[in-house]
Every structure is written in structure tokens, then in C-alpha cells.
Amino acid sequence: MNVWFYIIVMAVIQGIAEFLPISSSGHLALLGALFGFDGEKSQALGIVLHAGSLLAIVIFYWKTLLGFLKPEQWRLAAMLILGTIPAGVLGMALELSGFAKDLFDNLMVIGFAFLITATLLRLSEKPKLIIRPSGQEDAEPTPLDKISVRQALAIGIGQMFAILPGLSRSGTTITVGILTGVNREAAGTFSFLLAIPVIAGAALVHAYKMFKHPPEAGDITYLQMAVGLVVSAAVSFWALSFLTRLIKRGKLACFAWYLYILGAGVILWQLTVMIRKANGL
């Protein structure tokens, strides 16, 4: 496969699926099975593409990030740290155990995870399902700077489950935020800010693997990596802008139908493969 084509395709997929609620990990695993794309082909490229997405978040939310220098924003920073812990602990355990690769290789599981993501996106538009503490049933949705420990932890647990390929990180965390009473826009912002340590962590994992198994000389040039960075950052920024507008309008469920069709298709495909193997075909 042409290296330039590979880099552009992976950069576009990274940018779109990292933020739109369709699961980047699920799509990369699916494309790997269909077309032979290998997510581990270049650890250096993995670092660069994640760095592009990280750069997009920093540019998009630069005012909010600068606000963390002020004491009045330290509480929000603490809630983000709390929300990061569950996924960080589970992710590290999966990586050290070697079980993470098994998850990416099981397309049947990924197919069902797509269906779960679709259902979560549908639930995000059901106000009657919002859970609030006793006595606060009629309270206004929680703004970003008032997100509670309960809400931050719930969102963090949602992010932990979203380690499963096919289960969208943004879709899960935004839905959990909305269903625990967080304002729609605040749920989106919290989810995207929560992505910063997640994406940075993924880049560090790639860097660690590259350090352990250095790539062959000439695998991917600096120019190609620079193009990958720019494409990933540009597409990521567009995806962020697009999704924040959809969140404001309460239109997350528009992605559900795509995921229902995709998930059902993957499951039927894998069932067909299993039947053919059972019959020796």
C-alpha cells in the first residue's frame, strides 16, 4: 500500500473518529480487518496522529485551559483529574496484561459495542431518564464549573468502559454527563477536556512501544509525519467544531442510525465467517 495514502487515510480517520461519537478504535480495528491497515505499522505515526488531535483540543479550548491558572478553576481541574482515574487504571492494567490486543481482534465484540454506542446516543435525547439526587429532581442542568464529584466519577467510569473498541469515548462520556444532570454543552466540554490526558496517554504508550521496538530506518519520513500531524489536527478541529454544534442542538442521535447499521453488518459478517468455518468452507 502506498505510504502517503496510508498516512492520509489514518490521519483522517483519527481526526474524525476521535471526537465524533462513532468510536475511533472500533473503526480502525474494522478497517484493519477489511483492508489490511495495521494500526501498529508505525509507532512514530501513532504518536504524531494523536499529537494532532491533542493540538486541536488545545487550540479549540485554549481560553478554558488558560483559565486553569486561576484558583477559581482549580475545582474543575480536580474534577477532570477524578474523571481520568478509572480509565487510566483499567487502561494500564489491560496494556500490561496484553489483553488490550485481544479486544481489538474480536470483531464480534466490536459489532455489539457499536450497537451499545448507538443506544447510548439515543438515550442522550431522553430527558425523562436524567438522574438527579433526591430533592433536586427539578434542578437546572449543572454548568461546567459546578460539576460534582458524583457526576465526574460517573463520567469517568463511562470513559473506563469506553476502552472497549466500538464503544465511543465521546458518545459514552457525553451521554453519562447528560443523564446525570449536566448541561449539554458542559457535558461536551468536560468530555473533550477529559480527552486530553487520554490522548496524551495513548501517545505515550505508542512512544514506549517504539522505544522497546525501534522502527526500521526509512519506515516513514519526517515530511510524511509532518503531513500526518497537520491533517490529523485539521480534521480533529473540524470534528470538534461540528460535534459541539450538534450537542447544542441535541442531535447526537443522528449518529445512532449509522452505528446500528454498521454494528448489525459487522455481526452478520462475523456470523457468516463462523458458519463458513464450521462447514469447512
Image (tube, grey):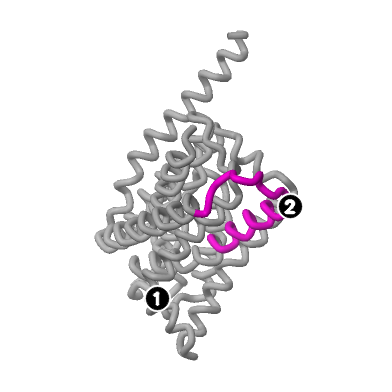
Figure quadrant of residue 179: bottom left
What x and y, as percent, mark residue 259? Answer: 39, 40
What x and y, as percent, mark residue 94? Answer: 69, 50
Which stretch appears magenta? Answer: 199-222
Instruction: Answer above or below: position of 102 versus 179.
Output: above
Q: Residue furthest bottom?
A: 71
Indicate which disc residue 62 carries.
1
Q: Check disc 2 and report the residue beneath it.
A: 212
What x and y, as percent, mark residue 131? Answer: 43, 64
Amino acid type shown at disc 2: Lys
Is residue 117 at all visible to an observer of this figure? no
Given residues 235 and 84, the one toward you in this image is 235
Given residues 20 and 220, the one toward you in this image is 220
Please give the name of the residue rendered at 49% of the width and 29% of the height, measured from the top-left corner: 34
Please give the name of the residue rendered at 53% of the width and 31% of the height, measured from the top-left corner: 36
What x and y, as percent, mark residue 144? Answer: 40, 76
Amino acid type shown at disc 1: Trp
Q: Is residue 166 magenta?
A: no
Q: Main secondary structure of the magenta part?
A: helix
Q: Residues within 10 Å of mark 2 (few under 14, many from 20)?
A: few
Which mark is nearer the camera, 2 or 1? 2
